[in-house]
Image (cartoon, rainbow, N blue to C red):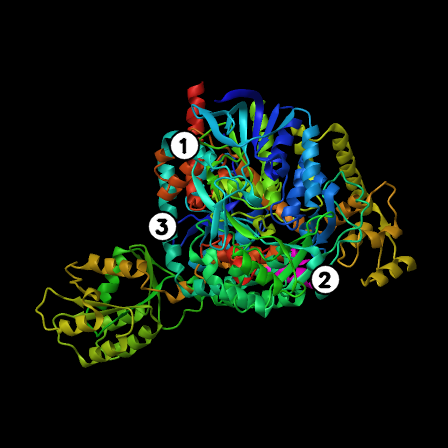
Amino acid sequence: MSEHISDTIAAIATPPGEGGIAVIRVSGDDAIPIVNQVFSRDIMHVESHSVHYGKIIHPADHSTVDEVLLTVMRAPRSFTTENTVEVSCHGGIVSVRHVLQLILEAGARIAEPGEFTKRAFLGGRIDLTQAEAVMDLIRSKSDRSFHVAMKQSEGMLSNQVRLIRQELLETMAHIEVNIDYPEHDVEALTNAFIREKCELAQDKVRALLAKADQGKILREGIVTAIVGRPNVGKSSLLNELLQENRAIVTDIAGTTRDVIEEYVQVNGVPLKLLDTAGIRETSDLVEQIGVERSRIAVNDADLILFVLNYNEALHEDELELMDQLKDRRVIVIVNKIDLDKKLETDRLELLFGAEQVIYMSITEQEGCKHLEDAIANLFFEGKLEGQDMTYVSNVRHIHLLKQADHALQEALDGAASMMPIDMIQIDIHLAWEHLGEVIGDAVSESLLDQIFSQFCLGK
Amino acid sequence: MSYEAGQFDVIVIGAGHAGCEAALAAARMGCETLLVTINLDMVAFMPCNPSIGGPAKGHVVREIDALGGEMGRNIDKTYIQMRMLNTGKGPAVHALRAQADKFLYQHTMKETIEKTPHLTLRQGLVDEIIVEDGVCKGVITKTGATYMGKTVVLTTGTYLRGKVIMGELMYESGPNNQQPAVKLSESLKKHGLDLVRFKTGTPPRVQKETIDFSKTEIQPGDDHPKFFSFETKEGLPQEQLPCWLTYTSEDTHQIINNNLHRAPMFTGQIEGTGPRYCPSIEDKIVRFADKPKHQIFLEPEGRNTSEYYVQGLSTSLPEEVQLKILQSIPGMENVKMMRTGYAIEYDAIVPTQLWPSLETKVVSNLFTAGQINGTSGYEEAAGQGVMAGINAARKVQNKEPVVLDRSEGYIGVLIDDLVTKGTNEPYRLLTSRAEYRLLLRHDNADIRLTPTGYAIGLIDEERYQRFVKKQELVQLEMVRLGETKVKPEPRVQEILRHAGTVELNNGSDMLSLLRRPELTYAILEPLSPSPYELDDEMKEQVEIQVKYAGYIEKQLAHVERLKKMDKKKIPQDIDYSLIHSLANEAKQKLEMIRPISIGQASRISGVTPADISILLVYLEHYNRVTAAKGQ
């Protein structure tokens, strides 16, 4: 067996958003001590293949994060052949992420795509004939995550991170020039200058983290509203989406407004459906609050599914909605095409674009595939940006931002204790790298480019 | 018309800074070595600035010395000024820089070469390399001499199809009007090496007696000079010579702007790629138009010469414009120009065609070092030279090549960058190219590399024992400091107060005190003088290792990971096209670079972490299948 690199990795092992129970798998030399740090009981010496009930405890304030079951498997009797702990969390999507966050802070790193399988193979756990399949798995998983990363790299978070990085890069170039061209007549660097720059960067990183802590961002997904007049088929559409795609039931604290949210994945795109309760109610009651409710939902949404009846002419309420929706990301769903045409579809196509108008008959199961494709296209072409996803949208990002924050703090501490600039530079560089990982860019050649474009050097 | 002129183990072509180190290393390792060069008067010649060292470059000279090379010893014997730069910064970036007596430097190096056993120095212009079945067998000179060699090291500098450019004037030439090597380029191409065209330049030289130094600022050397070689204990008896600082004037910029139409850089006459970090004065004035003045350092070229090097004024403008520019600079109103500045274009090979041992992939037993590999600088050349010499000799001796990794030295960084990433401009070392800058210090080059130099056979037993002793004493002293308690008594508090740090409440040990930023070994020494015989270097070592332990450990943790990746070797018969899951870009790059380890593979641009994972799985599969076949 080849000696391989086995730092400890962790990831959510169950597919995202599937069901109420999620498993976090932790594997590597230090899997057991790392989980032990955040668990209410001592598992350091427990037997292999034993299950333990207990609580995940926040090491800072000792609060309980979740009640869990731990399964401890010692090397080599595990899937990866390494020490492995599996944490079964019961508290829904938010607490799973929180638990993973704590495990990362305790010293694990997030697993690369396909890494558990890779380790299983390198450990001799998987048959030689499967090598090809393992390699394909790594490829496809990483391509998929690359896709998502690319998509995110267009968002607000990326722009802000890029800005912070560029400022850090300029500071770094300044420091490097002082080091590599000591006799050059560039502005000498003071410790105060470096502190000011680091504080500025740290403030910005912390602002991003603060947004993450509001909890909002943990609820990942494209915020989607289904709107339309009563009886156009909103609830049929909702049921169709929930049936066809796996629904995610959540009980997120702080969402006990009258708007209830549900999650679905459509062609791999996570949607957060707003006001599902409202839709259900209005399907039972014939009332006039439909439009008012819709208006509230529309304001919060990234994506609006606007449902109309093929069999009815445009209603005054719908005209009002159209006006409200004209600059928004909208998919128009013309339902009940099995009935006679009375709707002025030309006007809809003119206003929203023909390709955004989907003709369906939900009860006849017609056109559903078109809708799903339309949603996926919007997402993968980058036209759709979830509010949440533009911010710090996942555990990995939060973790990297925290590491960047920490590195900047070390830089500041170094500056405060009058460490030489090349030492402080180590931490600034580290912060810059962590931020680079957030946006998938860590090429250090750009530092040299920066130096030579910012300063006039030469013999 | 050719004749058999001799058989050697190692043949080195070119006696510049790379060639001298390569030839000396090979000969000292016991190989019969030939050093053949166009003009014996140009051995170890400095065609550009008369100085050695500075950040990263000075570190390389220390590394060469720690490995048993010559550059450090040679400059210690021939300097006219020594200066430690960056002393206000951390110990990792302290950088020694010497002004050389460039004539003495050459003569001293030539003498060393002439007196080295197993080493033959011969004047000659090599036209061809002899290659049979992809293996280099020797060289043929212009005069018909055929030298057979088991290995050949090419260090051609800027001589390969060299072309000098000054304004509209252009002619075939090596540096300083030397004969260029024209035919050799063809021979290299014929045997499958890809060439690129690079460019560099040098400023004019002026006569000392015509400079008005009163209008310039003096730049003296250090009062207590340090040295490049770990073996040099005493400085030269002569007084050091200063350099002088002046600036370009508004007139200078005006003259240059008026003559841009005659600047080869802008007229398209120059096809070679020049270095960004070493632009000509015309380039600087165009690119940084709002900078009102640029620094100009005047540096003596030696003790027995009037020639001064005008640092900062590298140019390829026409001769008469150069003179006008010079005379527009304060202090040089009446200056006489002795040599004209020029740009020079030359052929280099694409360095990704090399193994990390510096042997070419297409022609085995052929090694290259220095500017031919796309670098710039004497130190960069010498660093590669010593490695190429070592590995050419080891190939003759049937031994594995020695490859320094990125945590062991700037030489490792330099070579890894060249062979893994390539370069699209003349490559210069900068400390910022090193990930582990704090570990690659001027002071610890011996700790990093002297054991390697000893193992190779370039460091003799006596020197090695001195080195071992030094390390022992440093360790003992650190242990002692940890065990030595200090009480808050008046004489202690007095010293602390005087140094501007807080006084003791309770007892402390010496180690903890030394960690305080305000305190140094020298300040604390009177509290508890060491029972060991420590010299200044050892005390410095103790201080650095204690003071920066936190930062050093941080970098060491990273190095651990690097070493693991570098240890995972990739067999050379792997066919990357068979690994379907690799991305196409990765396949092409891996096929071209043929990395020797997973570590090197991971540093190729365009190879992603997913590709590395796939490669690891493939290797595991490959190894298991190979093992199964073997049974």
Residue density around tag 1, few if under 14, some if 14–19, many if 20 or more, within 10 Å: few
Check residue B583 in the rendering and tell me which mark sits there, or answer none.
none
Estimate the x, y position of residue A128 in percent, counting from the top left.
Answer: 39, 30
Q: Which comes before the other along the chain, label 1 or label 2?
A: 1
Look at 65% across and 31% down and name the residue there.
B24
Camera-side residue of B621 and B395:
B395
Relative to residue A335, is residue A439 depicted above or below? above
| Identity, as a three-letter code, of the amino acid under mark 1 | Lys
Q: Mark 2 points at which residue?
A: B213
Closer to the eye: label 3 or 1: 1
Tell me the distance, in whole angstroms, between the alpha carbons under discs 1 and 2: 53 Å
Estimate the x, y position of residue B117 in percent, counting from the top left.
Answer: 68, 25
Residue density around tag 2, few if under 14, some if 14–19, many if 20 or more, within 10 Å: some
Q: Which chain carries label 1?
A: B
Tell me the distance, in whole angstroms, between the alpha carbons under discs 3 and 1: 46 Å
| Identity, as a three-letter code, of the amino acid under mark 2 | Phe
Estimate the x, y position of residue A158 in percent, counting from the top left.
Answer: 44, 62
Give the SS element for disc 2: helix
Q: Mark 2 lies on which chain?
A: B
For the magenta stretch, what is the residue range? A408-423
Give the SS element for disc 1: helix
Q: Name the residue under label 1.
A: B190
| Identity, as a three-letter code, of the amino acid under mark 3 | Arg
Residue density around tag 3, few if under 14, some if 14–19, many if 20 or more, within 10 Å: few
Give the SS element for disc 3: helix
Q: Mark 3 points at which residue?
A: A144
Camera-side residue of A403 and B64:
B64
Most frequent secondary structure within the magenta stretch:
helix
Look at 47% across and 37% down and name the residue there.
B182
Relative to residue B490, is residue B461 depicted above or below? above
Camera-side residue of A232 and A49:
A232
